């Protein structure tokens, strides 16, 4: 399964047009704030899918990228002069999994299984 993520594909910066902001606020029931909006927000995705290019501000070109569900909590949006790309490196996935392991009460066999999975991810460049 994959997850949709919104990013800006041009130099300038992430933002919505006025009609995009209005539709987002109508769908979400909250004020749009481009600095705190979750890029996986279903309302934001609906705005971009519904309005297409009309969702873009003067300085944005919003796109939807599908990412593997494994990365939904551990991708990074990298930005240079407003142009963004989505980082799905194996290191991010391993870091996320390590932070969320509960070692209390795990058997040696369970620990080995987790370590083997993490090693596999790193050895096989999981996403690429």
Image (cartoon, helix red, strand yellow):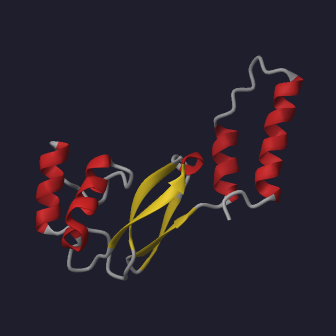
Tell me where residue 68 appears, x and y as whole percent.
56, 52
Residue 54 spot, x, y in % from top left: 18, 72
Rendered position, 92 above or below 96? below
The residue at the point 27 percent across, 62 percent down is 48
Q: Is residue 90 above or below residue 41?
A: below
Counting every numbered tag in the picture gives 0
x, y (%) of residue 33? Answer: 23, 56
Of residues 87 and 52, the one drawn nearer to the viewer in this rendering: 52
Q: In this rendering, would 63 be left or right of 50? A: right
Quarter of the view holding residue 56: bottom left
Outermost top residue: 105
Q: Is residue 59 left or right of residue 20?
A: right
In percent of the image, x 36 and y 51: which residue is there? Answer: 38
Residue 87 figure quarter: bottom right
Q: Position of residue 74 (x, y in %)?
A: 56, 50
Q: Left or right: 71 with respect to 125?
A: left
Q: Residue at x 81, y 50 (%)?
A: 120
| Camera-nearest residue between 43 and 35 | 43
Residue at 52% in and 56% down: 67
Toward which corner of the image does residue 92 lie, by quadrant? bottom right
107 vs 79: above or below? above
Quarter that holds the C terminus: bottom right
């Amino acid at each position: 399964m994959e997850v949709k993520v919104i990013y800006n594909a041009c130099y300038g910066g992430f933002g919505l047009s006025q009609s995009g902001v209005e539709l987002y606020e109508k769908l979400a029931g909250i004020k749009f704030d481009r600095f705190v909006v979750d890029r996986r927000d279903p309302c934001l995705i609906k705005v971009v899918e519904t309005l297409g290019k009309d969702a873009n501000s003067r300085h944005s070109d919003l796109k939807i990228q599908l990412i593997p569900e494994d990365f939904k909590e551990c991708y990074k949006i990298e930005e240079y002069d407003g142009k963004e790309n989505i980082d799905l490196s194996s290191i991010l996935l391993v870091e996320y999994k390590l932070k969320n392991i509960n070692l209390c009460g795990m058997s040696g066999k369970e620990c080995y299984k987790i370590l083997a999975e993490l090693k596999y991810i790193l050895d096989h460049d999981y996403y690429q």
